[in-house]
Amino acid sequence: MLGTRCARSDKGKTRVVTSAEDPQSQNGLDDLFDRVNQLLGTAAPRSDDDDTGNGPVLQHRPQVTPRQPFTPRQPLTIRESGISASLIERLIMKYLFQVGLVTSRGIAAQMKLPFKVIEPILKQLRSDTQIDLAGTTTTGDSEYAVTEAGRERGRRYHEECTYFGAAPVSLQDYINSVAAQSIAGQIVTSDDLMKAFDGLLINQAMLNRLGPAVNSGRGMFLFGEPGNGKTSIAERITDAFGSSIWLPRALYIEGEIIRLFDPGIHEVVENQSAAGLLDSQQIDRRWVRIKRPTVIAGGELTMKELEVTKNEVSKICEAPLQLKSNCGTLVIDDFGRQTMPVDVLLNRWIVPLEKRYDYMNLPSGKKIQVPFDQLIIFSTNLEPKDLVDGAFLRRIPYKIEVPDPSIDEFRELFGIMSRVLNFAECPECIEYLIETHYLATGRPFRLCQPRDLLLQVQNYCNFHQKPLEITNEAMDCAVENYFSVMM
């Protein structure tokens, strides 16, 4: 009979090992136990120092394998949350200072933490007479009210920082999540690009140039004449990756709470976990599932937006644009027309583009290394060589020109836009436009012009109370208005 013994696996989980176990079967058991632990949300924690200086904290980190995408697992204890009990207490007291009376489950929902995590803190606060039990709901949930002593403590905490939203995530957990969801590890095919650019007129030659640049996960210049769709291309590139990521609502770094999730930038997607309800209950609600982000900064971009900013009234910090765009795309539109000098912007990013990490300045003056993991796109109407020197051009390996459309592409786009705007197609009128107002005058074609001219025709028809119809007369009027101060 084979003997057995209990042993510790290399990941710290107990398993049964037979004395005659061969290496192949042992690996199979390891995989089985790892899978069971992942499904139960009991991945082994790892000891690390917390960012409050209070000593080692067991960081609860999701297991990531090639077979299972990154998913933040719900912490089971305060230590597994990666933040200190004192920080959670401050959030609870600031919340009670604002609302006065709330149920224990309501507090847990506000903190985005399981009740079992905050329960010992509530008991301690009640023992310290900072809060008191005010009653019980019909469902058996305890209601807590803040005492006078607790109100004073909450007020002091509120003066230090007004934030009392979801409990933040530690920097190390965030770094691990970026590594697991890195855009550099994604593969984009020609079919993916075609799907992302659905509705845009892009020829195969352009797709063949864009594909390798997107797969590089590093950066590119999109340059060419205005009106040919550079911004539209840049905005849609992230869709080619076709996946969502998990993003913390807020980070806790060196005593500062930094908001990372931005509803104005990040698009939330519904949780459609294949594991069902049980799995959704195990997800750490401090994280939010979003589409891979596309962050666009235009001519209004300033150096302030590239650093952590602290609101002097609320004392809440806001993450810089490059941190919000991690695992996605950062588009610098109208590059060269920012209020800051071009060389200042380039010097700020020349090291991150090369090293794939950035140094973030905290309000305290301390520098923190953070991931710089995004496809960065510089969109410009100017020649890249006229804007930057060779050292920077070397760090942007792809320079792609977006050319003017051909006559055939121009005709095709007119047909597409006619259908979109509910016009009956009129090939004769399009030929009249091309011959009279383009070829005869030497005017260049632009991809935006069919849409813009047809919108003017639409307004012309509405004003004259005519049915939507493309006519030579309407085209003449549209061209006169549209090109009055242009070529």
Image: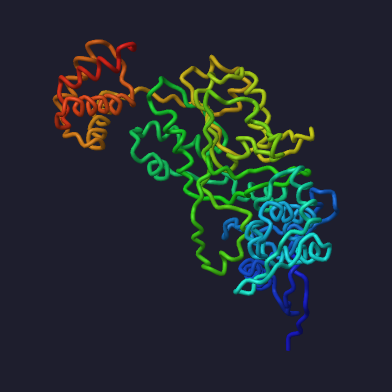
Q: Residue at x 69, y 72 (%)?
A: 26
Choose between 101 and 210: the one closer to the eye: 101
Residue 311 visible in the picture:
yes
Q: Is residue 24 above or below residue 113?
A: below
Q: Is residue 54 left or right of residue 318?
A: right
Q: Is residue 214 left or right of residue 456?
A: right
Q: Choose top left, top right, bottom left or bottom right for residue 68.
A: bottom right
Q: Choose top left, top right, bottom left or bottom right for residue 448.
A: top left
Q: Position of residue 355 (x, y in %)?
A: 68, 34
Q: Is residue 149 left or right of residue 261?
A: right
For the image, the number of numbered tags is: 0
Q: Is residue 107 above or below residue 322?
A: below
In the image, farthest residue toward the front? 148
Image quadrant holding the C terminus, namely top left
Q: Position of residue 204 (x, y in %)?
A: 36, 34
Q: Residue at x 50, y 46 (%)?
A: 267
Q: Residue at x 57, y 46 (%)?
A: 185
In the image, farthest residue toward the bottom? 1
Q: Position of residue 181 (x, y in %)?
A: 59, 49
Q: Position of residue 400 (x, y in %)?
A: 46, 26
Image quadrant holding the N terminus, namely bottom right
Q: Is residue 369 above or below residue 445?
A: below
Applied colour scheme: rainbow
Choose between 401 and 309: the one closer to the eye: 309
Residue 24 visible in the picture:
no
Choose between 324 and 109: the one closer to the eye: 109
